Amino acid sequence: MKIIRDLQEITLNEPLTASIGGFDGIHIGHQKIIENVVRNSIKNNTKSALITFKPLPKVFFSKKNFELISIYQKIDILRKFNLDYLIILRFNAELISMNHIDFIEDLLIQKLNVKSLTVGDDFKFGKDQKGSVSDLVTYSKKGYFSIHIEDKHISDNKRISSSLIREAVLENNFALASKMLGRPYSVSGKITHGDKRGSKIGFPTANIKIEPNVLLSGVYAVSTKINGKKYDGVANIGYKPTFNGENYLFEANIFNFSDDLYGKRLNFEIISKIRETKKFSGIEELKKYINKDINTAKKIFKSNE
C-alpha cells in the first residue's frame, strides 16, 4: 500500500477505484466498503484507493480531538486490506476553501483519476460543504466515473457508525465499541521515558505520548501483548492533576512485568474504565488509590475470564 500525503507534486495516471470519507475507527461497516473497493478494482482493472482526511473535518472544526484511532493505527489496519493507495488529504484552509465543483473536477477527476467512487449517503464536501452526493451523481451520469452510494451498515438490527462507537466509549461500553469495530478498542504508541515518578513510589509505568483525546480521561483496566504473551494492567490516561501535569499522557502499570520496553511500539486494549481522574492530597493518598485501582482491575479481568 503506497501512502500519499502530498498531492501538490503528484497526478495519478492510473485509473482508480476509490472510496472517500473520514473512516474513523475503520469499523466493520468501513471494512466492507474497503473490501468491495479492492474487489471492484480487480474487476475494473484499476488501482484501489482509500481517500481520507487528516485531521478529520469534524475534529478540525470542533477544535477537539475525538478520533477513535490515530492516523498511525489507521495505516496499520489498512495495510491488511491489500489496497494500492492510501491518500491522506490535508484538511486545511486550502482544501476548505476549494469549491465543490473544483473538488470534483480538479481533485477527483484530474489529479486522482477516479473512475469508480464509493461514498456514504451523507458525504459532504467543498467550501461551506455545498457539495453533496447528488453532485457526484450528476458527474457520474455524464460518464466521468461510476458511483456507488453506501447505505448505513447494520449489525444485530443496530446501525454501525463512528458516532455510536464514540458514545459507547464514553459510556464505558467497550464490549459494544469493540463489536462495532470488529476488534478490541485500543490505544497504541511507542514507549517513551516519563518522569520516573511511578517507579519511585513502587508502581513503574510504560508511557506513551499520545494526542489529547476527549474520549479518554481517567483510570482504565488495559491489556497488552509483549513478545506474544498477554499482560494485564491499569492505565492512567489524560493529565496528572496531583502533579500539575500539563501533558496528556498514557501511563500503564503492567502487572508482573519489569523488562525494558523503551522504544517498543505496544498496543493496549482498553477493557473498562475504573474511575475518573482525581487530584490527591499527596503521595500517600495517591499510592492508596493506585492499589485500589489495581485490585479493581484484577477483579474486572477475573470476571472476564
Image (tube, rainbow, N blue to C red):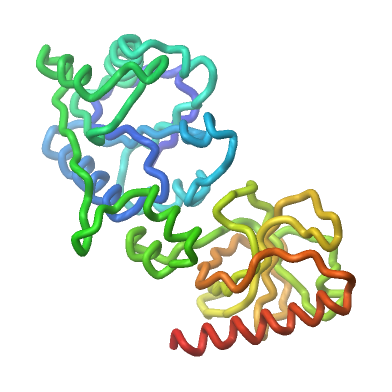
Vertical arrangement, residue 200 with respect to residue 109, above or below = below
Instruction: Quadrant for residue 275, please give it.
Output: bottom right
- Indicate left or right for 222 with 16 as reference: right
Q: Quadrant of the C terminus?
A: bottom left
Q: Residue at x 63, y 59 (%)?
A: 217
Query: Which of the 4 image quarters holds residue 50?
Result: top left
On-image quarter of the N terminus: top left
| Position in image of residue 302 (x %, y %) | 50, 89
Of 221 and 254, nearer the camera is 221
Is residue 25 toward the left or the right of residue 40 in the image? right
Residue 132 location (% of width, % of height): 27, 22
Total labels drawn: 0
Residue at the image point whose x is 41% and y is 53% from the top? 77
Residue 138 shown left or right of residue 16 in the figure: left
- Report if residue 47 is visible in the image: no
Q: Is residue 19 above or below residue 174?
A: above
* Pick the front one: 111 or 254: 254
Horizontally, is 283 left or right of 191 in the view?
A: right
- The residue sitting at 27% across, 45% down in the picture is 34
Q: Is residue 57 visible?
A: yes
Q: Which residue is drawn at the image coordinates 41% and 45% (left, top)? A: 24
Against 172, residue 70 (above or below) is above
Rendering coords of residue 216 (x, y %)? 58, 57
